[in-house]
Amino acid sequence: MSPIHFAFSSTFLLGLMGLAFHRTHLLSALLCLEAMMLSLFIALSIWTLQLNSTNFSTSPMLMLAFSACEAGAGLALLVATSRTHGSDRLQNLNLLQC
């Protein structure tokens, strides 16, 4: 495994571990998701450059567009939950009390 592949796989795994173990605030979960998407975007961009193919050149931009949509939806949920519940702590959220 090359150092570049190791760096991006470790970045993705650190984001995944942060999402799994540090679930106190919704903002930290959103930041971990964004770190995972950023590492996937950079890895996909490098993979496209290494293949030297024009067929996959639009896939990193498509993934970046989906990542921006996911970030916008996550921030909208963050604002909505902080307005209704008073904080962004995930322990205060209960789906049965909707």
Image (cartoon, rainbow, N blue to C red):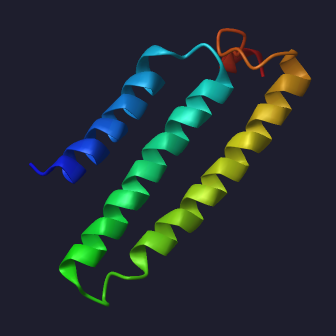
Mark count: 0
Left or right: 29 in relation to 20:
right
12 lies above or below 92: below
Name the residue: 21% across, 74% down. Answer: 50
Which of the pair 65/80 is nearer the observer? 65
Name the residue: 23% across, 52% down. Answer: 4
Name the residue: 30% across, 67% down. Answer: 46
Name the residue: 43% across, 81% down. Answer: 58
Left or right: 27 in relation to 97:
left
51 lies above or below 89: below
- Residue lying at the far bottom in this picture: please name it: 54
| Picture coordinates of residue 41, whole percent (x, y) | 42, 59
91 lies above or below 53: above
Snapshot quadrant of residue 14: top left
Which of the pair 93/39 is nearer the observer? 39
| Picture coordinates of residue 21, whole percent (x, y) | 43, 15
Which of the pair 32/76 is nearer the observer? 32
Left or right: 77 in relation to 27:
right
17 lies above or below 58: above
Snapshot quadrant of residue 68: bottom right
- Residue lying at the far top in this picture: please name it: 91
Which part of the image, by quadrant, shows the C terminus? top right
- Residue lying at the far front in this picture: please name it: 3
